[in-house]
Amino acid sequence: MARLIHLARALVALTLTVTALGLQPSSTSSGFPYPTLAHPPKVETIYRFPNGTWLENLAIRPDGTILSTLLSSPQLLYTDPKHPSPRTIARFPRPAMVTTGILELGADTFYIATAAISNRNLEYERGASKIYKLCLAGWSPVGGKKPPKPELVASFTESGWLNGITALPQNSNIILAADSGLGVIWRLRLDTGAIDVAANNSAAFVPTGAPPPVGANGVHAGKENYLYVTNRSKLQLSRFRLDMEGSPAGEVEVLEQDAKVDDFSVGPDGGPDVFLTDGPNGAVLSTGGARLGKGPRLPERSTLARTGGPTAVQRGRLPNDRLSLYVSSSWGGMEYNTTGPVPVGGAITKITFNIKE
């Protein structure tokens, strides 16, 4: 009897949490669309960029300012949400045509991936991808101070085109880079500069004839030595365990299927709670019981907000931003790869939740 009472109380608590978050009832258990929140969060555009600007990824600096990579030019942009007047703080030389992944590794120190690829038809130059390092510690544009220049870390001469990048929590000397063109995950050892293929499995590969031909996309290393991977062609979010050197140490586990996911953000403890972007459907999603700050966990699967062509999402880092997400976008979707140049500009969007901590 005591066990039944405990179970009943747990179910009541879960029901109250779901009701407080305003989740609409739905019979949908997987795939898109996920059920939406009856009381959606506040969605505001921080900045809309000029037509043709495709924001691919973003990183939040310790001071709350935002760095954005571009699938429309080989630049890195800086935006202060409090005074949104974006500026270019780095331009990368040829053969770079775009900037893709960005990773903070060390205090205010970032690694940026570049590639030679057309965002219209996804044709790429083999072996042109590189990773650069940019240390911004102590820098701000106040007073017209110029940013430091990025330094080349590695050239991936056998790559297709690099996309998302991540570091191993248990071995920060190793960076893993998703190759969306070849459908593999590369390993870069920062101490020696050595590069090799770390993973070539079902989480990463590009299915034959897949439209679009984009394999491993976003990658984030999480707790318990898991690597989380989105695969655009396979419509999947997967994970698998890694050893201390970043090689697969377990089978691939599919967490989400039939979702046109791009990049994502894992929880502060490294997963498995995840915020996802679904560009073609214009949605920001949550899965795995994601949470913000110390508030209650969101339902297992939910649509948090709708915005045009979201490409990446990150949690706010300042105390007054703990209940916020920042989203970069192409403001279109993958269909623009085949129909022509992006007809409108991408954006940085802020999503703020009214959740009691």
Image: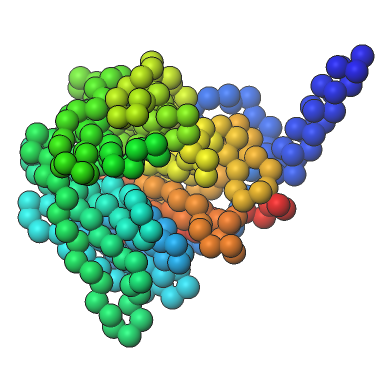
Q: Is residue 19 visible?
A: yes
In the displayed orientation, state which residue is furthest to the right.
Answer: 1
**Relative image position of residue 131 (x, y in whole percent):** 19, 48
Residue 356 place in picture, x, y as percent? 72, 53
Q: Name above or below for residue 172 compared with residue 104.
A: above
In the rendered image, residue 335, in percent from the top left (x then y), is placed at 29, 41
Taking the spot 58% from the left edge, 24% from the top edge, the residue there is 29
For the question of whether residue 54 can be seen, the reply is no
Pick the residue in front: 117 or 309. 117
- For residue 299, above or below residue 115: above
Position of 353 with respect to 201 (left or right) is: right
- Residue appearing at x 22%, y 33% in the figure: 186
Corner quadrant of residue 207: top left
- Name the residue nearer the viewer: 306 or 79: 79
User: Looking at the image, what colour scheme do you see?
Assistant: rainbow
Taking the view exactly as shown, the residue that stands out farthest to the bottom is: 143
| Residue at horizontal 45 percent and vertical 43 percent from the top | 265
Along the line of sight, the residue nearer the viewer: 199 or 161: 199
Q: Nearer the viewer, residue 346 or 10?
A: 10
